[in-house]
Image (cartoon, rainbow, N blue to C red):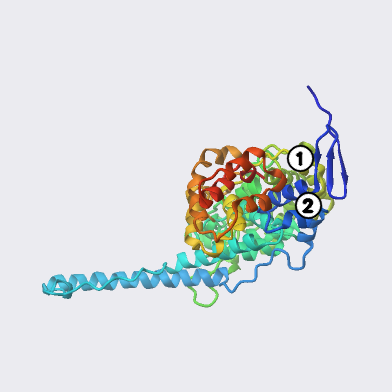
Amino acid sequence: MLIFERRVRSRGEFMILTGKAVSGKEAAALALHRFGFGPLGDQINAIAADPRGALAADIDRPAAGELKVDLPSSAEAARAVFDFQAERRAQQILAQRGQKEEQANDAPRMSDAPGAAAAPEKPAAPPLPQQLLFNEAKARFDAAAKAEIGFVERLVWFWSNHFCVSADKIVGMAGPYEREAIRPHVLGRFADLLRAVESHPAMLFYLDNVESMGPNSVAGINRDKGLNENLARETLELHTLGVRSGYTQADVTSFAKVLTGWTWIPPGEPIHGGEFVFNARLHEPGAQTVLGGIYPQAGVDQGRAVLADLARHPATAQHIARQLAAHFIADEPPPALVGKLAKSFNDSGGDLKELAKTLIAADESWTPRRQKLKAPAQWVAAVLRLTGAQATAPIGLVMNAQATLGEPLWRPPAPNGFSDTEAAWIDGVPKRLDIANIFAGRVPAADPLALLESSLGPLASPSSRATVARAETRRQALALLVMTPEFLRS
């Protein structure tokens, strides 16, 4: 049976003309879970009069997306990791030399002397690369846990995954990359965001462009090396146009030639190591044709011109619109919503703030049916936010929890980032109960039923309320709360 639905919106209320009324509080709870990381304190009541207005205010805040932290830049972190690794190698070499000398002299070791007592070992501090990652992760989770609404932070996470790099390959730069390339442009223009990420040393290293040389460049001729097409291909396929959008292998190759010379100063250079540089000796000379456009030889500006055209390509608008709608609303988003977002992208010249406003203004974004399963990272952040456990849980525990659930922070399995679909995460949901129990044990005294009301309110079903109420202990009740279907979905 087909049921005709039409939504009428008044202040604080959404009415579906099939007889179901969605109250202001329900719309507020939906807003905070669907576009943020869940409510904080009494937020459901606080924004019930105008949930869409609260989301809009979040993105209109001055310096929205900015993260004020005293952490090293990506270049500083890269140099620090290089120095750490160089020093460790030197220590290993010295230790090996000492062992050889000891064996040659057949000298007894002090630890072998009669009566020598082993001194108790102190817990080792995390090595520098891991500590840098921990510091960045803590800043990220703290921002999510403390954000008043959380919409901007969710946008940061979305774009960071869309333009992902991996700490497995560039450990010191993964966190700073998000702060430097994503956050400053998350509500700006897509063209500026695209240029920032594709020229960032973390991306250039992750996708191997630092190794790419024009076959006819000075360096390519002298070193008998050539192109690496990874950055060009992923920029077209993942970052802008999308698959099956009309580009060819010839376009990939030409674009790769355009991007030759986009590299970094190796981190071993003590002052500017880790910084972006355009090296003309690596750049393929001559004009290039990409997607039918001819780009004359212009050094670094040749690449910037191609990126600018990709940013305003209609296929890019469609690709970004679908990705955004799939992230926030449904794995298979409503075509009408994708169309609205694509039109907003095109009409505004890729203004990402306008795109976000179009998303929250569209009635298709407010369906009461909650179709998105929270990905592990989003769910972990929601648990920390609800319980306040981020104040007591070591960041290593938080990161281990996320990794256990299959979404290790800044370690995507491939350049297309972590999946945004339920199929990727549904089998791992039972594992979340163990994580929930761990975090529940770190929560200060709190009434689980009161937390259920503040976190879910009108979204909580009678069944979920009864499940939490029947729990034998407060810890069990908290764990069951964050495992309810209503809390698992956005």
- Tally the numbered discs: 2
Q: Does the image show residue 261? A: no
Mark found first going from the N terminus, 2 or 1: 2
Give the quadrant of the N terminus. top right
Q: Is residue 233 above or below residue 210?
A: above
- Which is more toward the observer, 51 or 60? 51
Disc number for residue 367? 1
At 66% from the left edge and 60% from the top edge, which residue is drawn? Answer: 182
* Image coords of residue 71 (percent x, y): 57, 72
* Image coords of residue 357 (percent x, y): 80, 53
- Location of residue 151 (image quadrant): bottom right
SS of the residue under disc 1? loop
| Crowd rating for badge 2 (residues with CA inside 10 Å; few <14, some 14–19, many 20+) | many
Hey, what amino acid is under mark 1?
A: Thr
* Image coords of residue 98 (percent x, y): 22, 73
Left or right side of 16 for 392: left
Q: Is residue 489 above or below residue 176?
A: above
Give the quadrant of the C terminus. top right
- Which is more toward the observer, 289 or 433? 433
* Image coords of residue 303 (percent x, y): 67, 58
Q: Is residue 40 above or below residue 101?
A: above
Left or right side of 152 for 257: left
At 49% from the left edge and 44% from the top edge, which residue is drawn? Answer: 431
Q: Which residue is mark 2?
A: 355
SS of the residue under disc 2? helix
Hey, what amino acid is under mark 2?
A: Leu
- Which is more toward the observer, 304 or 215? 304
Disc number for residue 294? none
Spatial CA distance of label 2 from label 1 is: 19 Å
At 52% from the left edge and 70% from the top edge, which residue is drawn? Answer: 77
